[in-house]
Amino acid sequence: MGLSSKVISNSVFNTKYLKEVVRLDKNQKSFRLSFSEFTNRSVNEYRLVFGKKNIELHKKLFDKIKSNYGIPAEVITAFWAMETDYGAVLGDFHTLSALGTLAHDCRRSDLFQLQYLAAIRLVENKILSAEESLGAWAGEFGQIQMLPLDILIFGSDGDSNGKIELVKSSKDTIATAAKLIQNKGWQADQPWIEEVVVTKEFPWSESGLGRPRTVMEWKKLGVRLRNSKGSQRIDDLKANLILPQGRKGPKFFAFPNFRIFMEWNNSFMYSTTAAYLANRLKGDPEYITENPADILKVEEMIILQKLLRRLGYQVGRIDGILGANTRQSVRKVQMRLGLPADSWPTIELLQMLATKFN
């Protein structure tokens, strides 16, 4: 069914070119904080206190979702917190204008042209206001910051009032997030991440995404779960051992459900933090850490990336960001130098490379 000419005309009339959106799109900054710095900001008292209150407030809906989809309340609530602080911070960019600007002047214009058309459909469906709807600079809106195409597919009426109101309704927000997470392949009654304790003699090169073993196999290597309370029988489940801040930082098993966190936001830092926040909301203690080295400064990371590339390693763009390629290359050069291969670059590693290979 086509869009009505009246809705199209009204939507286009209310779409303005936003220079600030173009500037933000061309100057996106990925996370340049260490895991401990980012979690200290993100897993704060406000989010923990109000997250638990929201879980209790909407217990009936969360119980229904758990029964239907197997998704724990804490997982949905963690995303809700990370995106908008439970609806407190929704963004102040006019949604149609942001999408129209990105569709016109963007390195991903094909994607945003589809999103803009989907937004007009949301206007016709009275889910989005052509005149007033506000959200993030990249066109996401609502309490879980979704793009229009996802809202068209997964938008749900959680409070059964005949409307989908992702800005005003917490219940619609919860139901929509649940439907999206379920569609991504959430496995019921299985963990997402679990904190672990590792022996000093552990072969660190076995850690990292892409090197899964069963929990039983990890146990034979000296890895044990820190929190056994409420844990399922998971010895046969496969998991990766992830070290978001190297061998002296916190350590986690990442189970298949962790993939949903990565698909929600492809940043390893964001995804691990959201998964950890979900654990804290279900009652887990703060993670153990051993004063790990801080993350390199941007200019130091750029020097490291240049050195790694000169040595033949793949680091992707020279951008000063510790992404997946740089982490993998750090692991390889640590193995080459006989160092603990935990994929975490330190100033000592940088100095060693500069002296040895520069």
Image: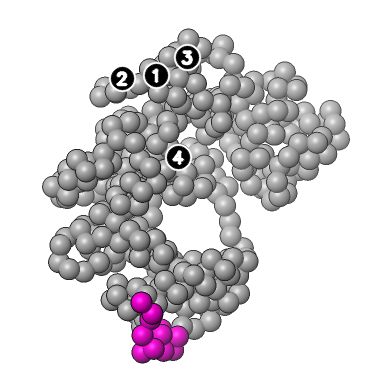
Q: Which residue is mark 3?
A: 217
Q: Are marks 3 and 2 in contact (CB under 8 Å)?
A: no
Q: Which residue is mark 1?
A: 236
Q: Which residues are magenta?
A: 1-13
Distance from label 1 to label 3 (Cα)? 9 Å
Residue 211 screen position, x and y as percent: 56, 26
Q: Is residue 267 above or below residue 137?
A: above
Q: CA distance from mark 3 to mark 4?
A: 21 Å
Q: Quadrant of residue 69?
A: top left
Mark 2 element type: loop
Q: Position of residue 2 (x, y in %)?
A: 38, 80
Determine the residue located farthest toward the right in the rendered image.
358
Mark 1 and 2 residues: CB-CB less than 8 Å, in contact? yes
Residue 185's spot in the image, x, y percent?
38, 42
Residue type marked 3:
Glu
Q: Are the two marked residues, 1 and 4, in contact with CB atoms closer than 8 angstroms?
A: no
Dot 4 crowding, Cα within 10 Å, few <14, some 14–19, many 20+ = some
> Is 217 in front, or is 293?
217
Count neighbours of disc 3 (C-alpha within 10 A) and say few if under 14, some if 14 to 19, many if 20 or more: some
188 relative position to 64: left or right:
right
- Residue marked by disc 4: 259
Mark 3 vs 4, N-terminal side: 3
Earlier along the polypeptide chain: callout 1 or callout 3? Answer: 3
> From the viewer's perspective, is residue 101 above or below residue 285?
below
Q: Quadrant of the N terminus?
A: bottom left
What amino acid is labelled 2 in the image?
Arg
Residue marked by disc 2 = 233
The residue lying toward the viewer, choosing from 51 and 72, is 72
What's the CA distance linking mark 2 and mark 4? 20 Å
| Mark toward the start of the polypeptide (3 vs 2) | 3
